[in-house]
Amino acid sequence: MALARTKEQTATADVDQIIFEHQVKVAASYLNLLASQRIKFVQGKNTERAQVFFDMTYSRATSGLIPEVDVSLAKAEVSHARSLEIKSYDKELAYSKQLAVLLDDDFQTYELDSVFNTSVPIMLWDQIQSKVARHPLLELQQRKIDESAQSEKFIHSHKMPNINIFGVVQGRGSGFDWNYVQDNTAYSSSYFKGAGIQRSNYLLGGTLSWNLTNIFRFDSKIKEQQFQSQSLKQDYTLLEKELNAQTNLAKVQFQNAVDNLEETKYSSPLHS
């Protein structure tokens, strides 16, 4: 019963892990789509600037102020900017399709919330670090360890003696009273009188059997299961370290992104 319970817990943890992975995929697809929409917006602005520069260059070239070759260069810049805008739109469509599939939705162009484009998210790293211990992947690995430990106990039970207890109860009815021999009318023709139990016998017993060869035969199986338990525990430790390292890496990368954002503000030509 304990082994069956741990197997159920492992299956439940496996389902939770699959749901968590799907949630991560949806979140990643959402953010990728948001970034692609922003890139497409930026490429559109680059196309507009290239077009303005082309118009200015064309006007100056037709006036004879600059060589006409500059017009060709400006036109190439417009084409290049337009090409990048189209490619960024292809990316947006691809991520839109991916998000629609993950959400079990029809293909469409999503209008996403621009909060991540206009503000820096607040990251509570202490809370995030504390939640690593409750990561669904670690929960699944722990359930596997518990299941392996119960398997060890189950295999070990085969080395013990087998005890069987049985019991038999027998009953009968007659409808005749105890003094029927003296009084032949002392009986009943009722069915329930005849079917009722008036005499009963019972037997209780037990058996004890012990196959001594099981002691040696199951030793190797127990050791094998113990090695599997140790392997699962080592995998748990490695996975925990990897998740902690990923959390610390994400913290540093997030800070680098914030620092880079601040630098772009000062490097902008509009900043003065």
Image (spheres, rainbow, N blue to C red):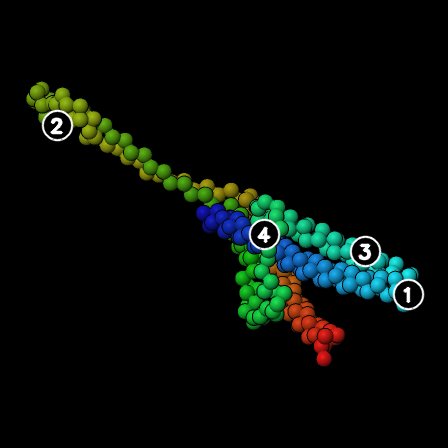
Circle 1 residue: 64
SS label for mark 2:
loop
Q: Quadrant of residue 59?
A: bottom right
- Which numbered disc, 2 or 1, marks the residue closer to the eye? 1
Q: CA distance from mark 2 to mark 1?
A: 140 Å
Q: CA distance from mark 4 to mark 3?
A: 40 Å
Circle 2 residue: 178
Which residue corresponds to the image point at 64% horizontal and 58% vertical from the top-left? Answer: 34
Q: Can the viewer see residue 159 in this picture?
A: no
Task: Establish if 230 lies above or below 196.
Answer: below
Spot occupied by residue 74 in the image (x, y as percentages of width and height) = 84, 61
Circle 4 residue: 22
SS label for mark 3:
helix
Q: Residue furthest top?
A: 184
SS label for mark 4:
helix
In the image, is 110 to the left or to the right of 184? right
